[in-house]
Amino acid sequence: MPDSQSPRTELLSSMLLELIEILRDRQGETWSTIIRIAAGKSATIAIDNTRIHVQTADDQELQITISTAEPDALNDFESTGLALRNIMFGKSTLERAVASGKIFIRASFGDLLKIRSIVQSVLLDSEVEPRLLRLWTKFDQEWLK
């Protein structure tokens, strides 16, 4: 997690790490898909102008390092908290949010399809995993306040 960061950066980092820990703990197809797609990659993520850089190890544990995004780094993922909330709680879809410009993802078409697959899997897991629902509620209560 980044050191001496803003409260928003720390919150975003901790929630992302919590999401990964829940999915790692569950194992299953969602985790296997994440490993195949994300291992050894990095991305700059911006949510409501809070920016972090995420780097994953190229291994089956998918160790993650989160740091402050460089000021001149291009964002690979941009969204508002409200757009994410609407996807988490089924009020919108990733496709609709991307098509309307509420979410931006810098990726090839093939990678977009893989990202879509992961999002759908995580949302399906939310139906049976109370820790994911608690994380979505935490995001709703703490990020959007």
Image (cartoon, rainbow, N blue to C red):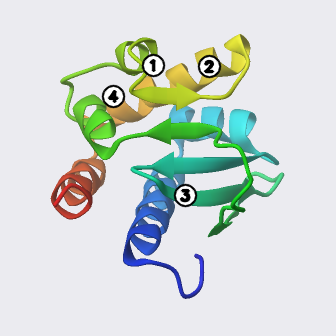
Q: Is residue 40 left or right of residue 117?
A: right
Residue 92 is situated, as x and y percent measured from the top left of the image, at: 25, 21
Q: Residue at x 74, y 54 (%)?
A: 72
Give the residue number, with chain letter if any, for mark 3: 51
The residues bearing labels 1 and 4 have C-alpha atoms spaced at a distance of 20 Å
The numbered dot on residue 112 is 2
CB under 8 Å between discs 2 and 4: no
Cα separation between marks 4 and 3: 27 Å
User: x and y percent of residue 117 in the render?
Assistant: 53, 21
Between the C-alphas of marks 2 and 4, the distance is 18 Å
Task: Decide: is 5 above or below 69.
Answer: below
Does 98 sit above or below residue 131?
above
Q: Which residue is mark 4?
A: 124
Q: Name the kind of residue labelled 1 in the image.
A: Val
Mark 1 or mark 3: whose residue is earlier in sequence: 3
Can residue 61 be seen here? The reply is no
Q: Are marks 1 and 2 in contact (CB under 8 Å)?
A: yes
Q: Nearer the viewer, residue 18 or 9?
A: 9
The residue furthest front is 72
Identify the mark nearer the N-term, 1 or 2: 1
In the displayed structure image, the side of residue 126 where residue 48 appears, left or right? right
